[in-house]
Structure formats: C-alpha cells, structure tokens
Image (spheres, rainbow, N blue to C red):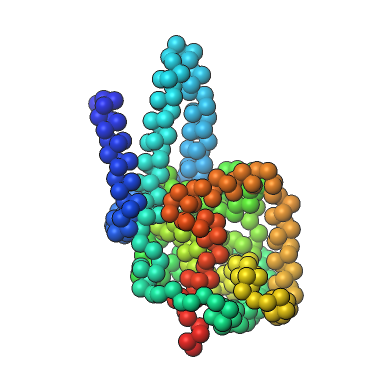
Amino acid sequence: MKISKKVRLVILGLLILLIWITRYFPAMGEWYALHIYPYISIVLSSFSSLFPFSLGDLFILLSIIGVVVYPFGAWHRGLSWKHSLLKVTEYLLWVSVWFYIAWGLNYFREDFYTRASVSPIEYNQKSFQYFLQEYVTNLNASYVSMSNLDKYSVALNIKEGYARMDISFGLAHPKAWQRVKVMMFSPFISKVGVSGYMGPFFSEFNLNRDLLPSQYPSTYAHEMAHLLGITSEAEANLYAYLVCTESDNPQIRFSGYFSLLSHVFRNVSNLLPENEQQQMVNSIKPEIIQLYKDNRAYWSEKYSPTIGGIQDIIYEWYLKSNKISNGQKNYSEVIQLLLAITNPSKE
C-alpha cells in the first residue's frame, strides 16, 4: 500500500524532531547507543556482509547521480523546477534521517569521561612527560618488521580484543560476520588523505586500498571502534591503541604504538621546549623515525592540496555540526583520554 504524501511528510517531520531532541539530551543518545544501535547494526551489517563491495559507497554514488540527473529528467517530462527541488530536498532529508537512525545518533551520547567514570587530569608538561617516557620505551621495544602482514589474523585478533573490552566504555559487541570493506574509490580518497571511514548507511567500515602495512592494524581497529558505536575520533584512536597494544601479535602491537606517534609529536611541539623536543626524537629508534618519514612521504605524493583543502573544510563543518566542537583537532586528544584512564603520574 502506497503511503500518502501527507503521511510520509508527517513521519519525516517527527523523525527529524526526534533527532533534534536527542541532540540536546545525552541520556537519550546513550540509551540509543546501548539499546537500539546494536540491533540496528546487526540487521544492517548482516545484510551488507552478503556483498564483497561497499554498499555504502555504491549508495552514495547512486544518490549523487540521482540528485544531479533527476531534475533534468523531471524537466523533460514537463515537471517544474520547483517540483524537482522539493523532491530532491525530501530525498536528502530522508537520507539524513537514515544516517542518524542507523548510526549518527551515537554523536549525541554521553561523553567519554561520564561513560568511563573517570575524571580528566590536568594536562600539562609534567603529566605528559610521565606518559612520554613510558610510551617511547614501549614503542622502541615493540618495533618489528611489518612485511608479510596477515590481514586475516589482524581482523580476528582485533575482534577478539574488542570482545574483551571493558563494558564501561559502552561499545557494541563485535559480530563474526562484520568485516572490513575496501573503498570503491581509494585513489581519489588518497588525494584527501583519508585512510578509512565508517559507512553508516549499511553498518560497514571501509579501509583505503593504499594503506601501508604499518598502518593497517591500527586503522582497522580505529574504524571498527566507529562500527561499534563510537563517533569521537579521539575515542576511536584510544580504543584502537588499547586493542592493538594489548595484542599478542607483535605486528599489531607495534602498529598500535606507532599509530600514536604523530599525535605524540604534535603534543611534544606544544608542551615541551625545543631542546627537549629534539631529545625525545633522538630517543626513538632510527628505524621507527625513518618509517614515520617514509609514510609521510608516501601519503604526500598521493595528496592533492586542492581536493584535500575542500575536504578539510567539509569535514571540519561535519564534525562541529555533530557536537565534535574542536573539529579535526579531536584526533590528537587521544593523549588526554589515555592519561585519564592510566594517570601515569600516580604510579
């Protein structure tokens, strides 16, 4: 039975209102994350796992084509541009509702400190140096060659790690059928420097085909955190770090420590004087520093400043509009979260 336009628009309006209300009530977002999202994810990921390619990428591609082509088709049939505009607007609103109901409401859940029952610690040079000393020691000790990386073993190991994750963090439980998808447009995505992303429409997580072996395990774990209901980039970095560094697989463990290095460097430049910055760099194994430089050069060759600049503007707006107030800087706040749960200065 076809739903009348009036009923359809009323349903759409009510869903938009529900999303808007949830935005301002974290308890509602948390209830969704714990009691609704896991079941939505089960249904969507069960379906999308039947396909070897990314359904979300295909859906976005077809939607873009449809939004561009539809007005011309409607005009050819004698329909007005106003009619086309209203139809396209309604479609985009339904897509937006689907995004939030399928995954996006996780943006509005309670913050990390509330869920984990920890308090932020004072983030200063002293607390950072406590962390830094232990981090560099573990990073150096974990170094191994990343050649011949077994991606199947990575997937299995990381899923097991998330299955053991403390329930206080509020992640959904990983399912056996949930598996990574390769981006349909990896060469283009590499131009904007994106290594992976969550596919909310069909509960998929996607990785860039161009990922280097040293990045693969930690990026896999980062994107899986998003699949399990985490929207904060800092939190996803935290869980990826915890899962990887606690692994009994040496390559996964090194990837976990290595994934934090760029964020550590950023914090070092902000908190330590120049002479201590150089001392810190000198304390890291030369092989690791060289790997870091090689990785940066690899991605720099693929990056397009023009396309990447546009993507940065859009992504910054996207994050801030979904209550990630500090935008892309959120990625490096992983250090503060890690300090909060370990508080190394008390040891």
> Which x, y percent locates residue 53?
52, 44
> x%, y% of residue 327?
52, 55
Up/down of 76 relative to 2, above or below:
above
Dividing the picture into quadrants, the one containing residue 47 is: top left
Tell me the residue at 37%/71% (across/down). 116
Q: Residue furthest bottom?
A: 347
Q: Is residue 219 above or below residue 82?
A: below
Quarter-of-image position of residue 126: bottom right
**Quarter of the image with the N terminus in it:** top left
Residue at the spot 40% in from the left edge and 40% down from the top edge: 96
In the image, taking residue 299 as reference, residue 323 lies left or right, namely left
Whole-percent x, y for residue 224 in the image: 47, 59
Q: From the viewer's perspective, is 282 left or right of 14?
A: right
Above or below for 104 versus 159: above
Q: Is residue 198 visible?
A: no
Which of 309 and 168 lies nearest the eye of the viewer?
309
59 over 244 or under it: above or below: above
Any part of residue 95 in sight: yes
User: Residue at the spot x=41%, y=20% of the render?
Assistant: 83
Query: Which residue is nearer to you in this view: 1 or 119?
Result: 119
Question: In the visual, does 16 lie left or right of 320?
Answer: left
Residue under the point 52% across and 61% down: 330
- Choose between 2 and 21: the one closer to the eye: 21
Tell how many labels. Answer: 0
Rendering coords of residue 269 (x, y %): 66, 70
Q: Nearer the viewer, residue 205 or 271?
A: 271
